[in-house]
Amino acid sequence: MEKIDTVVIGAGAIGLAIAHELSKTNPDLVVVEKEKSFGRHTSSRNSEVIHAGHYYDTGSLKARLCVEGNDMLYDFLERHSLPHQKTGKIIVATSEDELKILDDYIQRGTANGCKGFELLTQEEVNTLEPQAKCIAGLHIPSTGIFDTHLFMEKLADLVEEQGAFIVYDNDLIEIEKLSAGYILRFANGEAYQCCTLINSGGLWADQIAGLAGIDIDSLGIRQYWCKGQYYKSTKISGIKRLIYPVADPKGIFLGIHLTINLAGEIRFGPNAFYVDAIDYRFDESYFEEFYSSVNRYLEVIREELVPDDCGIRPKLQGPQDGFRDFYISEESCNGCPNLINLIGMESPGLTAALAIAKYVKTLLNNR
């Protein structure tokens, strides 16, 4: 049995960022991933947006790590010459009731440390984006887009350059707790013994925590799977910024928004609905929801909307729940010392990945 100081479970963006941060000073580290490559689920099935941090409750990990991660991510992308664009975003108000929501975003964003917010009149919005329909808008300049695949690829390269390893196609089936550390057993018969275990298992993070002996139900950290789909259009052009409606009032998702990829192509989404299985087949029964939502802020005809992609995010917030923060915890108090669980790592986890890694390192140093 191979003995390793640290094992990181999961080679999504957050797992790779953690491995990159920790292996700078301790390369005796292995990332284990059940899939044949990195980022096959939530990390690669998303809007590829760099968020600002104004949606999240002040003082929450989501707010703090998103704002910090925004700066860290842009710096990382620039240093490594990775494709990205600081497009900015306009959140549009299409009714009088939504004007108050824009004010709330400004107040919360300012409290969270976001910079550069600008409230725009309808005329000012249309100067920037003539196709947008609204009565006012909120311009957020720090929002952007990037290539998530190349970001993860660079992290994986750096992890291995620093002397650590990534092992793919390795499905974890058992965790045995020792007096000092853990034994991990995999479906292929392999086993590792480690001193420190980092659970960044994404959609399966709660189940992995359960394997380690954590009572996920008593702690309220059983995840819900929430699916989102995207439609695209090749007929719309000339839009330079992301355009968002105000977010779902329950905070389940950010509304069906318009995003641009680095090639300038337009797509809309995601929507949000809870599911019981990981299934990436596209369900066109939600078309009317998309069509009506998009037409609130942009004129689009039915024939212009074509099914694109879908993804599933792990949420701690159930269908009837309010805001739930990230769960990032060193589990000594729950009987599992030197285990760090990262559960409910949905948006803004991608934006915050590098800041999350730094936070995890701090938790380990403070043990």
Image (cartoon, grey):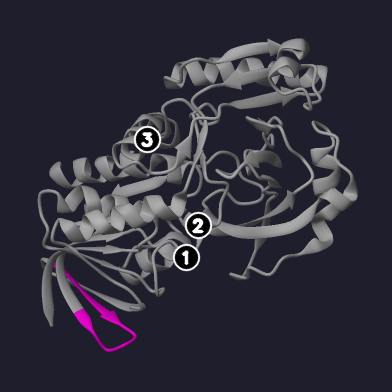
Which kind of residue does numbered mark 3 sit on? Gly
In front of the other: 326 or 54: 54
Residue 198: x percent and y percent?
27, 58
Total numbered circles: 3
Tell me the residue at 48%/41% (across/down).
Answer: 348
Please name the residue that numbered disc 2 is placed on.
44
User: Magenta span has 183?
Assistant: yes
The numbered mark at residue 69 is 3
Q: How far apart, in angstroms, are the residues tagged by discs 1 and 2? A: 6 Å
Q: Secondary structure at mark 1?
A: loop
Q: CA distance from mark 3 to mark 2?
A: 18 Å
Residue 200 in the image: above or below residue 65? below
Report the side of 139 relative to 92 (left or right): left
C-beta proximity under 8 Å, tags 1 and 2: yes
Q: Secondary structure at mark 3?
A: helix
Q: Which residue is mark 1?
A: 40
